[in-house]
Amino acid sequence: MELSQRKCVPCEGGVPALGAGQVVTLISQLPGWRVAPGESELHKRYNFKNFVETMAFVNRIAELAEGEGHHPDFCVRYNVLDVALSTHAVSGLTENDFILAAKIDQLG
């Protein structure tokens, strides 16, 4: 099943973070997303025409994230939005991060 068609599953810890091979497999389905070497966060940068468009997109992501029960970190610089995803309960990446990334891409 495509990542964007799946639903985030509540994670309260007690499960391992994804291994490097699993991360490579899942990230191949997400154009533009990256995991920097030595990091355990999924990142993507979005560019917009202006601040209003940037914040409108942030608000759409916030609504989506709340519905999924999985929340990204944001950094807004006028017309640039950096999104970071990780699963804090496992101090790493889980499938939830990739599911939410795929759904965020569908918003844009």
Image (cartoon, grey):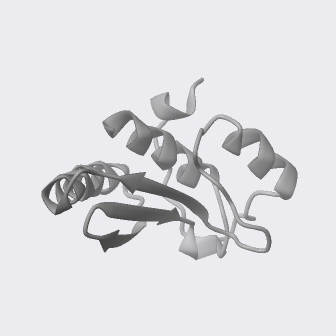
Can residue 8 be seen? no
Looking at the rendered image, the quarter that the C terminus falls into is top left
Nearer-the-camera pick, 53 or 60: 53
Can residue 7 be seen? yes
Q: Is residue 105 left or right of residue 107?
A: right
Please determine whether, in this image, residue 78 is positioned above or below residue 8.
Answer: below
Outermost top residue: 1
> In the image, residue 16 lies at what x, y percent?
75, 65
Nearer-the-camera pick, 17 or 83: 83
Looking at the rendered image, the quarter that the N terminus falls into is top right
> In the image, residue 12 lies at what x, y percent?
54, 69
> In the image, residue 84 lies at what x, y percent?
50, 65
Outermost right residue: 21
Q: Residue 82 lies in what quarter of the image?
A: bottom left
Please determine whether, in this image, residue 45 is positioned above or below residue 39.
Answer: above
Residue at coordinates 34% horizontally, 54% vertically from top-left? Answer: 65
Please determine whether, in this image, residue 11 is positioned above or below residue 73.
Answer: above
Residue at coordinates 30% horizontally, 52% vertically from top-left? Answer: 61
Q: Is residue 35 left or right of residue 68?
A: right
